[in-house]
């Protein structure tokens, strides 16, 4: 069923509420009743919402959020995923007093348009990143921060375009080369639980009732629920620590499925060495790794740090998990700002 988003509340929702409420009354399934009480979906992308802020590059309208004056030096943030969005990075606006903070949704993710699978490649994401850097810096190098999957892209970019980077901060990348991919997947699977996935059943039940425009809304809805539903503790967080509700607004399922799903099934299928050529980068480089994540400080020190440029400074985020930018923004922005300040003359 394809329903225009503007009409969703007036067409499908009343029918859905009545139908689901009756089933809930007869069966006592509370999850269905919860769905009946509210019809929901995912926000539109820049393809369908002309009011969304964007940066159009090579004809592609990337959803972009900017904080701070354009007279301040720019800092570009690369979000995690693949298939995440920029929303969880909004606390980084605290840097806007001294920098212009730029967040963008990657191709096929967040509120940027969905893209065909042949455009959902590491190579295309790196080309998009290069285009964004050139656009922001107008040919001059800029400061870049990459978190998780974004850190993977940033490490690869170090080797491809070291001349375009004024200073770089890499935060807990997942996998950078085949051996680290194998270890990453091993650790991830050690902490996967079938029972933990049961809480996402309501999202799957809602799929037939999600309004569509680009055809990706139903799977993106489930993806967003999963992104927002990470439990406290390993593999990513400290015990008792979890992301606040609404940290992500629209995941990009197809981006995740195309770029990473096969690697999760078969870690030996990850063919890339994203560290190749990274030693060409001679500028300031900070790696931040958390204490609690199983992909944190010890993992990064063993698997990734030895392959990064020799000048890399490795900093521990104490008593924090993978999402320190969201959950510990005061410490994160202070650490990033101090690093940039120490190298501002470069």
Image (cartoon, rainbow, N blue to C red):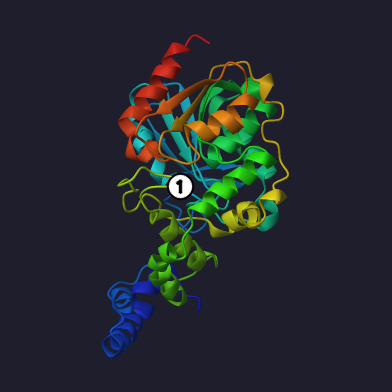
Q: Which residue is drawn at the image coordinates 65% and 56% (left, top)?
A: 262
Residue extending furthest toward the front:
190
Task: Judge left or right: residue 271 versus residue 150.
Answer: right
Q: Nearer the viewer, residue 298 or 253?
A: 298
Q: Nearer the viewer, residue 100 or 81?
A: 81
Q: Which residue is drawn at the image coordinates 48% and 31% (left, top)?
A: 297
Can residue 165 be seen at all in this image of the molecule? yes
Considering only vertical position in the picture, is 282 above or below 121?
Answer: above
Q: Position of residue 264 (x, y in %)?
A: 61, 54
Q: Which residue is drawn at the image coordinates 57% and 53% (left, top)?
A: 108
Which type of secondary structure does the marked residue at label 1 adopt? loop
Q: Which residue is drawn at the image coordinates 48% and 36% (left, top)?
A: 296
Task: Judge left or right: residue 239 versus residue 222.
Answer: left
Q: Nearer the viewer, residue 47 or 227?
A: 227
Q: Position of residue 195 (x, y in %)?
A: 42, 66
Q: Which residue is mark 1?
A: 235
Image quadrant assignment for residue 156:
top right
Q: Nearer the viewer, residue 71 or 123?
A: 123
Q: Position of residue 187 (x, y in %)?
A: 54, 47
Considering only vertical position in the picture, is 90 above or below 140?
Answer: below
Image quadrant assignment for residue 176:
top right
Can residue 95 be seen at all in this image of the molecule? no
Q: Position of residue 13 (x, y in %)?
A: 34, 77
């Amino acid at each position: 069923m394809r329903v225009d988003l503007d009409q969703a509340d007036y067409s499908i929702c009343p029918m859905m509420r009545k139908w689901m409420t009756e089933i809930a009354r007869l069966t006592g399934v509370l999850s269905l009743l919860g769905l009946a009480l509210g019809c929901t979906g995912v926000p539109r992308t820049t393809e369908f919402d002309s009011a969304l802020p964007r940066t159009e590059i090579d004809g592609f309208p990337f959803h972009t959020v900017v904080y701070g004056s354009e007279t301040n030096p720019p800092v570009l943030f690369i979000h995690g995923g693949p298939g995440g969005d920029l929303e969880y990075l909004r606390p980084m606006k605290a840097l806007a007093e001294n920098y212009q903070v730029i967040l963008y949704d990657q191709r096929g993710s967040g509120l940027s348009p969905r893209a065909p699978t042949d455009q959902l490649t590491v190579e295309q994401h790196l080309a998009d990143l290069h285009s964004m850097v050139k656009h922001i810096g107008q040919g001059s190098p800029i400061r870049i921060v990459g978190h998780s999957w974004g850190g993977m892209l940033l490490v690869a970019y170090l080797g491809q375009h070291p001349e375009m980077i004024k200073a770089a901060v890499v935060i807990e990348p997942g996998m950078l080369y085949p051996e680290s991919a194998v270890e990453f997947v091993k650790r991830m699977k050690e902490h996967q639980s079938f029972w933990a996935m049961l809480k996402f059943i309501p999202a799957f039940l809602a799929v037939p009732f999600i309004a569509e425009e680009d055809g990706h809304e139903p799977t993106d809805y489930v993806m967003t629920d999963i992104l927002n539903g990470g439990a406290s503790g390993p593999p990513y967080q400290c015990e008792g620590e979890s992301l606040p509700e609404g940290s992500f607004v629209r995941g990009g399922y197809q981006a995740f499925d195309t770029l990473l799903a096969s690697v999760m099934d078969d870690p030996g299928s990850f063919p890339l060495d994203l560290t190749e050529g990274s030693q060409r980068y001679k500028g300031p480089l900070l790696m931040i790794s958390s204490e609690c994540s199983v992909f944190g400080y010890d993992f990064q020190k063993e698997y990734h740090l030895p392959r990064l440029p020799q000048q890399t400074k490795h900093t521990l985020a104490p008593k924090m998990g993978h999402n320190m930018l969201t959950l510990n923004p005061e410490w994160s922005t202070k650490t990033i700002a101090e690093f940039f300040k120490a190298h501002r003359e470069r």
